[in-house]
Image (tube, rainbow, N blue to C red):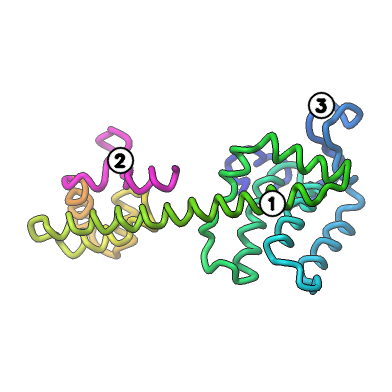
Amino acid sequence: MLDGVRGAGKQPGELRHTQNWLGGTRPGNAVFVPPPPERLLELLGDLERFIHADNGGLPPLVKIGLVHAQFETIHPFLDGNGRIGRLLISALLEHWRLMQAPLLYISGYLKEHQAEYYRLLSAIRTEGNWEAWIVFFLEGVTIAAAQAERNIVDLATLIAHDRRRLLASSAPSAAAYRLFETLPMMPRFTVEQVKQRLDTSYPTANAAVKTLTDLGIVQEMTGQRKNRSFGYPAYIELLSS
């Protein structure tokens, strides 16, 4: 998750060996100071046992909210804790069979309400106010689920519409149709990637890309003659909304 992005040089994948803090210039004036590094194994062990324990009928979504907040409080890595903590939400939703695929994008809700998100996490640590955090978290799940449902319908509608356009065109090749059906899994690609994905020749892959480009389904993204990259812009736009 940290390869080639912010945090790539901060011991990715390793528990921190030094004290970190959030806000301020030092622990003494920081907004939040996580536990010292020598306590990380103990605290992460407690969290792991909580995840796998039978908590007397505690609703799974509530438990996921508690786990996320505790992980962010432990803050076990030098960087990427927020990204990994949000991924943990999706992982537990699948692990406990609440969803069959990672379709719930709660990160957008947390980013949109970032100030409130940080305030409520802080209130857990300073006031023990878990209830307000859980209410906020469950509201986020509700909103994200409704958005995911709308996105799924919009994506299915787009794909069905573009499939009809392709089939109505003048005798689309089998490769062009196979490429179209691959687009949801590969919305950005090069001709070489199409060649490998379809296990075909370069000219056949190039012709398939050209067919979809001429129909306006696919668009060349670089504006270059060489090292061209293509995309399914309408699909990407819906995913980004």
User: Is tag 2's residue or tag 3's residue first in the polypeptide sequence?
Assistant: 3
From the image, which quarter does the C terminus lie in? top left
Mark in the foreground, 2 or 3? 3
Q: Residue at x 68, y 39 (%)?
A: 9
Q: Is residue 230 left or right of residue 119?
A: left
The Cα–Cα distance between marks 2 and 3, rounded to whole angstroms, is 45 Å
Q: Position of residue 206 (x, y in %)?
A: 21, 51
Q: Position of residue 37 (x, y in %)?
A: 88, 47
Q: Amino acid at mark 1?
A: Gly
Q: Is residue 79 left or right of residue 151?
A: right
On the image, numbered disc 3 is attached to which residue? 24
Q: Residue at x 32, y 35 (%)?
A: 222
- Mark 1 and mark 3 in contact? Answer it, CB < 8 Å: no
Q: Residues within 10 Å of mark 2 (few under 14, many from 20)?
A: some
Q: Amino acid at mark 2?
A: Arg
Residue 85 tag number:
1
Pick the front one: 45 or 224: 45
SS for dot 1: helix
On the image, numbered disc 2 is attached to which residue? 228
Magenta range is 214-241
Pick the front one: 149 or 84: 149
Q: Residues within 10 Å of mark 1 (few under 14, many from 20)?
A: some
Q: Residue at x 18, y 53 (%)?
A: 207
